[in-house]
Amino acid sequence: MNTFLLAVNTVSNGFALFKPLYWLFGKCMSLLLEVLGNQYFIALIIFTVVTRLVLLPLNIKQQKTMARTTRLQPKIQKIQKKYPDMRDRDKLNQEMQELYAREGHNPMQMGCGPMLFQMIFLMGIIGIIYYPIQYILGAGGFDTASKDIAEAILPIYQGIIGDPDAKIQYFQLNIIEHFDAYREVLQTEFPKIFTDALCNDIETYRSGLILFGIDMTAVPHWKDGIIVIIPILCLLTSLGSSVVSTLIQKKNNPAVQQNAQMMMMMLMMPFFSFYISFKVTAAVGFYWIISNIVAVLQQLFIAKAYPPKKTQAKLMVENTIERRSREESLKKIK
């Protein structure tokens, strides 16, 4: 019974908070697969590009805010030099707020908006990767019956891998991976869920999860041969994205010095993603690879289309016009 409880504890249909997002992304992915003839990875690439395009306006806005902040740096430094003493911190903050008000600048707009939305989209992507039977293939009643399903297939799974104490991980992916072995039991014990139509859909979906001979439902391991290319590409593309971002920032603002701590942070996330890519299925790693590549292209596009010097000049003109307009309005009031 303890072994079964271990297995059931890994059974998940996702976080309740994100289930509406899973449903929405699942419907979109299902439509893409239907249009593309079950080309899963092409659909995932299109999905990734579209989500990045949705976030593009936020990234452009962030770039403009950074350009405005860079333009104000001399004035900010002047105020900071005026109040070097910690006892004058209130006066410093007051003058900074007055500066921002005059310039129509809100430094908080540089915050974590794009990153927050990226994390939300990532949760949606993970939902359709980990829970496809429920959210892409539309298996009604799967959620409430998941524990019973786990109990039914666990002995078969333990026999497949030859370990009586094994626990099921990535439950819906496990069903897809070993569906040939599970199909008879599932259709016999859960005929209302595993109809002939759903079973055929699962087999079709399964065939689309093989890329260049790599089973993308599997978790990469060094001993498993070519599948390790997924974590390696995750590392390389993540490093590439970090390097490009750092070079663009350095070019845009040469005054910023890259110290050892910043360099460490730049390298930490790529190697962390490399580590995590050995803990999740290859399909998640594939999404990260595509996302990193699209991120690099997006950064290059923004740097080309909205260069800081040009953006700063435009902002200066807009700020001057706005300031004169306010002054004229005040004169009319007086």
Image (cartoon, grey):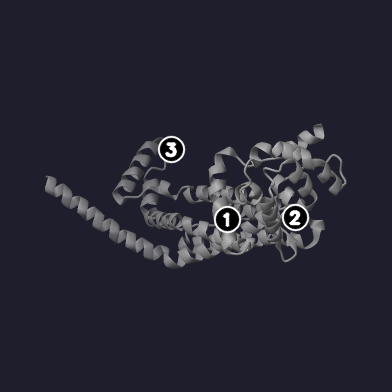
Q: Residue 41, located in which quarter of the rendered image?
A: bottom right
Q: Amino acid at mark 3?
A: Met
Mark 1 or mark 2, which is nearer to you?
Answer: 1
**Does 113 appear above or below 253?**
above
* Residue drawn at x 43%, y 55% as measured from the top left: 66
Checking the image for residue 21, the label placed there is none
* Residue drawn at x 67%, y 51% as measured from the top left: 198
Q: Residue lying farthest bottom?
A: 304
Q: Are marks 1 and 3 in contact (CB under 8 Å)?
A: no
SS at badge 1: helix
* Residue drawn at x 25%, y 54% as measured from the top left: 322
Query: Disc 2 marks which residue?
Result: 220
Place of residue 266 in the rendered image (x, y in percent of width and height, measured from the top left): 60, 55
Q: Amino acid at mark 1?
A: Met
Observer-nearest residue: 21 or 252? Answer: 21
Query: Disc 1 marks which residue?
Result: 29
Query: Disc 3 marks which residue?
Result: 86
Observer-nearest residue: 75 or 298? Answer: 298
